[in-house]
Image (cartoon, rainbow, N blue to C red):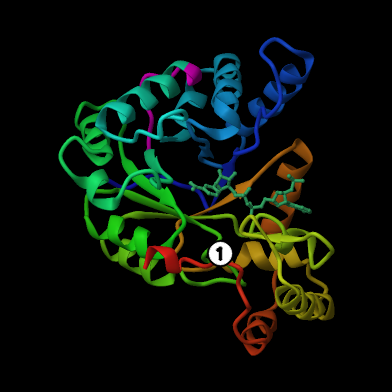
Amino acid sequence: MTLNVSPLTLGTSGLGRDTSPGSAEEEAVVAFAEQLVASSHAFVDTSNNYAAGRSEAVLGLAIARTGAEAATRVISKVDCDPESGAFDRDRVLRSFDETSARLGVERLPLLHLHDPYTVTFDEAIGRGGAVEGLIELRESGRVDAIGVAAGPIPLMARYVATGVFDAVLIHNRFTVVDRSAEPVFADARERGMTVFNAAPYGAGILATGAREGAMYGYRPATPELQEWVSRLERVCAAHGVALPAVALHFSMRSPLVDSTVVGISSARRLAQLDELAAAPIPEDVWHELEALGPAPSTIDDSAYA
Ligand SMILES: NC(=O)c1ccc[n+]([C@@H]2O[C@H](COP(=O)([O-])OP(=O)(O)OC[C@H]3O[C@@H](n4cnc5c(N)ncnc54)[C@H](OP(=O)(O)O)[C@@H]3O)[C@@H](O)[C@H]2O)c1
C-alpha cells in the first residue's frame, strides 16, 4: 500500500514533555500542536512512548480542536510495556488502544513497530509476537499500513526482508555523517515500501554545528567528528549555505527517501524548516562534501550484527 507522504514529516518526540494535563504549559503546547496537524506537511510522527504518552495526548487535544481532517495526519508507533518490557501481540493491541484513546482517533494511516529491542527478532515475528498484532490491526482496518521504526541496520535489514511491512523508518543512519541505512533503504524501495529517513541533523550537531557538548545520534560527538563537521561548515560557509540546509537536503534529494522526519519543537523551528527546505544548494557543495571523505560516525550497530 502506498502512502501519500510529503517530502517532510514533522517529528514530535519531545512534544508535551514535562507538561501536566490542564496546565498553562500544556495549553501553549496544544496551540503549537494545532499548527503541526494543520501544516502543509502531510504527516506528523509520534509514538505511544514519546514524552511518556504526552506527545500523543497533546496531539489528541489539537486534533479535537482542529477537526476530522487532522485525525488523518498522525502516524504513530506501538511500544513495549513500559514496566515489564513485554512486546508481544497482546501488548501491540493494548499499545494501539492507548494511542487511539489519547489521539481520539479510531483509525490510523500508518502504525510502526517501534524500537523492538526488548524481544528478539524471532520472538517479534513468531506466533503471538508483536508483528502478528500489527498484521491483525491492518487486516481489521484499524490501521491502513504497518511499518517498522528503529535504528540498528542489521536488525532493520531483517525486518524489511520479512516483506510484511508497508513502510520503514530508520534514524541517524542516512545523513551527511552516516550512510549505513543506504542498502536497507534500497531493499525497502525495491519492495515498494515507503521510506522514512528520520533525524537528518543527527539530532544535534548537523543543526548546531561543531561545538562543545554537540551530539550525534544521541551520543556525544567525538573530537574527530567535531573536526569533520567543522570542515563541512567551512564548505557551507564558502558557498553561503547553512549547515542544517545541507544536512536536510542531503536526505530530501535522495531517490531512496520518500519523506524526511525532522524533530520540530516550536513554531519558530517549523518556520525555519520551511526556509531550510526552500534554500537552494549549489551542486558544488555535494562534490565538496564527497571530497571530505567518510565522516567518523558515532553510530555503532555491531551488537546487532
Ligand atoms: N526509533 C524511531 O522511530 C525514531 C528515532 C529517532 C527519531 N524519530 C523521529 O524522527 C524525528 C526527528 O528526530 P530527532 O528530533 O531526534 O532528530 P533531528 O530531527 O535530526 O534533530 C532535531 C534536533 O535538532 C535541533 N535543531 C533543529 N533545527 C535547528 C536549528 N535551526 N538550530 C539549532 N538546532 C536545531 C533541535 O533542537 P530544538 O529541540 O532546540 O528544536 C533538535 O534537538 C523525531 O522527533 C521522531 O519523530 C524516530
- Location of residue 101 in the rendering, given as x and y in whole percent from the top left corner: 44, 16
Residue that extends furthest to the bottom in the rendered view of this protein? 291
Residue at position x 54%, y 67% from top?
A: 253
Provide the residue designation for mark 1: 251
Residue at position x 66%, y 82% from top?
A: 289
- Location of residue 54 in the rendering, given as x and y in whole percent from the top left corner: 60, 25
* Residue 75 image-quadrant placement: top left
Specify the amino acid type for callout 1. Ser
Residue 139 relative to residue 293: left or right: left
- Location of residue 219 in the rendering, given as x and y in whole percent from the top left corner: 65, 59
Q: Which span of residues is magenta-colored?
A: 102-110
Residue that extends furthest to the front in the rendered view of this protein? 84
Question: In the figure, 160 relative to 281: above or below?
Answer: above
Please identify the quadrant where the C terminus is shown. bottom left
Q: Main secondary structure of the magenta part?
A: loop
Residue at position x 80%, y 59% from top?
A: 213
> Considering the numbered disc 1 on the image, is that residue within a helix, a strand or a loop?
helix
- Location of residue 145 in the rendering, given as x and y in whole percent from the top left corner: 31, 39
Q: Residues within 10 Å of mark 1 (few under 14, many from 20)?
A: many
Residue at position x 30%, y 48% from top?
A: 166
Q: Is mark 1 within 8 Å of ligand 1?
A: no
Residue 107 among those drawn in magenta? yes
Residue 287 among those drawn in magenta? no
Residue 195 relative to residue 10: left or right: left
Q: Nearer the viewer, residue 239 or 187?
A: 187
Residue that extends furthest to the left in the rendered view of this protein? 127
